[in-house]
Amino acid sequence: MNNIQIKKTRKAFTLLELMIVIIILGLLSALVLPNLIGKAESAKRKLVCIQMKQIEEALKSFKFDNGMYPTTEEGLKALIENPDPEKYTNYAPTGYLESKTLPKDPWKHPYIYINNGSEFNIISLGADGKEGGEGDAKDITLQECNRH
């Protein structure tokens, strides 16, 4: 029996090892999280432009079929249901947006559609949902998206 040695197996981490892992995770999160938070808002602003360009394409299809863009009063809702069957006789039977609901910006606010007769604009009010603002709260327009 002297030749046979019984090995003790280790079944848990020591307190020191756990403390080291917690400190390392804390340091990593302190370095990484601030960068990720800024990226989330940047990604939302890019998503707004993507959605606006999809709406713009739907509006162009609407104009191609009907000879004009919907009025401001008719709004973007005109892309999912015909606002005036007598006025828009060539309206697409399925509408112009794949989803049968109006899209909202990443902050869950509706897009604003303005048609002044010769051109249109689409606006997102940004993170705060209020007109104006700076930084993440700054309004985003279709014209700004088309410039980038």
Image (cartoon, grey):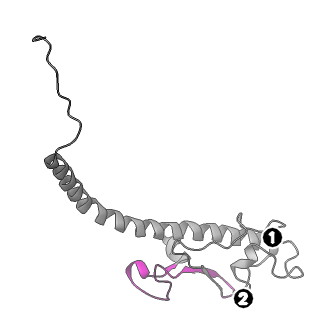
Residue for badge 1: 65
Q: Which mark is residue 81?
A: none
Residue for badge 2: 73
- Look at the picture and state if 26 lies above or below 107: above
Q: Position of residue 137 (x, y in %)?
A: 43, 81
- Amino acid of disc 1: Asp
Q: Nearer the viewer, residue 105 or 96?
A: 105
Comparing labels 1 and 2, the label whose residue is closer to the camera: 2
| Total marks in image | 2
Q: Position of residue 36 (x, y in %)?
A: 34, 62
Q: Nearer the viewer, residue 34 or 82?
A: 34
* Residue span colored magenta: 116-140
Residue under the point 48% across and 79% down: 126
Which quadrant would the N terminus be assigned to in this image? top left
- Look at the picture and state if 81 lies above or below 117: above
Inspect this view and state whether residue 148 appears.
no
In the visual, does 88 lie left or right of 104? right
In the visual, does 64 lie left or right of 85? left
